[in-house]
Amino acid sequence: MLNEGLLEKLKVLTESAKYDVSCASSGIERSGKSKTGGIGNATAFGICHSWASDGRCISLLKTLMTNDCIYNCAYCVNRSDNDIKRVSMTADEVALLTIEFYRRNYIEGLFLSSAIEVNPDYTMEKIVQVLRILRMRYLFNGYIHVKAIPGADPMLIRQAGELADRMSVNIEFSSVESLKLLAPQKNPQKLFLPMAQIKQGIDEVREDFGKYRHKSKFVPAGQSTQMIVGATRDSDRSMLFSAQNLYRRFGLKRVYYSAYVPVNSDSHLPSLQTTPPLLREHRLYQADWLLRFYHFDATEILSEHEQNFDLDFDPKMNWALRNLEHFPMEINQADYRMLLRVPGIGPVSAKRIVEQRKIGTVGYDDLKKMGIVVKRAKYFITCKGLFYGDYRLEPEYLKRVFGPKPEYEQMSLFSEIHG
C-alpha cells in the first residue's frame, strides 16, 4: 500500500522532474515471457509520455530520487541556494511506487533522474539499487530510463547499463563557457566520460552478437542527452554542431532541446518574465531531424555568417532558399539524397520515387499519391521536364509564398475611425 507520506514525496519530486525532456520511446523488445516469469514488457513502439503508432497513449513514471542537491546551478529549480521543500526517496520507495503504479495500469515504465545528493557515487548507487530491486525482486521487465551521474564510479555506470533500457547524460549547454558561467561546480570533461563508457559497453555487446547463445544486454535502447535553449548566448549553430559531434562521437540516439523556462532570478540568466523560446526549440528539432535522417551536415544548415535560424522558415526550406542553383531538379533523374533536399519530400516519399522509377517515369499526378507535399515541392522540381510552380524561382517571391502570412484584424462596427 502507498501511504500519504510517500505520495507527498512523489508530488514534490515529479514536479521537479518536469524540466527534463530527454525521455523517449525505447525502440527495443524486453519480453515479459521468460523461464523465470516476470511482469511488464517494453515493446518496440516504446515507452514515453506520447502516442504510439497505433494511437495508444504510453506513460511512464517520471520522477527524481531526490531534489536535495549539493550543486548550485543557476538555471535549476533544485539549486542548493533555493528555499524549497527538500525530499528524498529510498530505493525501495521508488521501486514500490513503480510496481504499484504499474499494477494499477497508471504506467508502463520508469524514467528516473536525481539531483546530486551527498556526492555522485552516493546518488548513482541509489539509482542502481532501484534497478536491482525492480529487475530482481519484482522481476519487472518494463522499460526503464535512468540518468548516468557524471563523476560516479565507472563500475556503477556499468551496473546501471546492464539493467536499464536507456541511459542519458545531460550536457545542458553547447559551450564550456556557458557551463562554467551557470554551473561552475560541474566539470565539462566529466560529462563526457559516462557517455564514452556507455558507448563502449554498447559496442562490446554488438561485437558479441551472434557469438554466444545467451547474449548480454547493455543499454539496448541507447543513450540520449539534453541541451537548454535560450538560457545563454549559445547560438543555434553552436548547439547544432554540438549535437552532430555527439551523434558521431558517442552514437547517441537522440539529442533533446529544452526551451529555457525561467525559474530563478540570476544576473547571468534571462529575466523571469522571459517567454520560453518554443519556436526556436522547434527549429532545432527540425534541424536535428535533417542531421539524422536527411543526410545534411551542420555546416550546410547554418553557416558562419548565419549563427541562428530564421524563425519564419523551417531549416530545410531555409537551405533551399539559399541554394536555388540546385533547383528545379528533375524528379525522374535526381538521386535519393538530392530528392531529400526538396521541400515537401521526406525519406519515405523519396524512396517511393526511386522505386517507382524502376517501373516507369513519375508524373506530376503521381506525387500526391506518394505522400509528397505538392504545394511546397512544385516550386523546386520538374516532372518530365515540366515546371508546375506558378512563378519562377526568385528568393523574395518564395519567401512571400512560404513565409508567415500577415495578420488582419477584424473590423468592428464600434471601432474608432481615423482619418
Image (cartoon, rainbow, N blue to C red):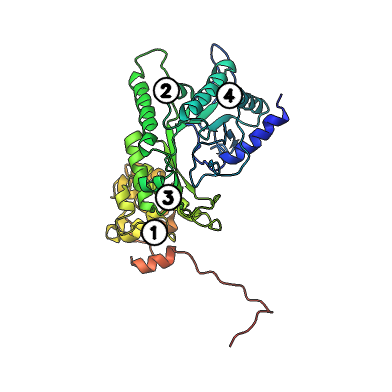
Residue 232: x and y in percent read: 43, 52
Closer to the N terminus: mark 2 or mark 1?
2
User: CA separation, marks 1 and 4?
Assistant: 58 Å
User: CA separation, marks 3 and 2?
Assistant: 32 Å
Between 148 and 206, the one lying in front of the other is 148
Between 256 and 382, the one lying in front of the other is 256
Determine whether 303 is above or below 346 in the image: below
Identify the residue at horizontal 68%, vertical 32% (top origin).
Answer: 7
Determine whether 166 is above or below 334 in the image: above
Disc number at residue 378? 1
Disc number at residue 91? 4
Q: Are marks 1 and 4 in contact (CB under 8 Å)?
A: no
Disc number at residue 158? 2
Q: Secondary structure at mark 1?
A: loop
Identify the residue at horizontal 59%, vertical 29% (top origin).
Answer: 108
Identify the residue at horizontal 33%, vertical 49% (top origin).
Answer: 339
Callout 2 amino acid:
Arg
- Judge from the rendering whether residue 17 lies leftward or rightward of residue 341; answer left or right: right
Closer to the N terminus: mark 3 or mark 2?
2
User: CA separation, marks 4 and 2?
Assistant: 18 Å
Q: Secondary structure at mark 4?
A: helix
Residue 184: x and y in percent read: 42, 43
Closer to the N terminus: mark 1 or mark 4?
4
Closer to the N terminus: mark 4 or mark 3?
4
For disc 3, the marked residue is 284
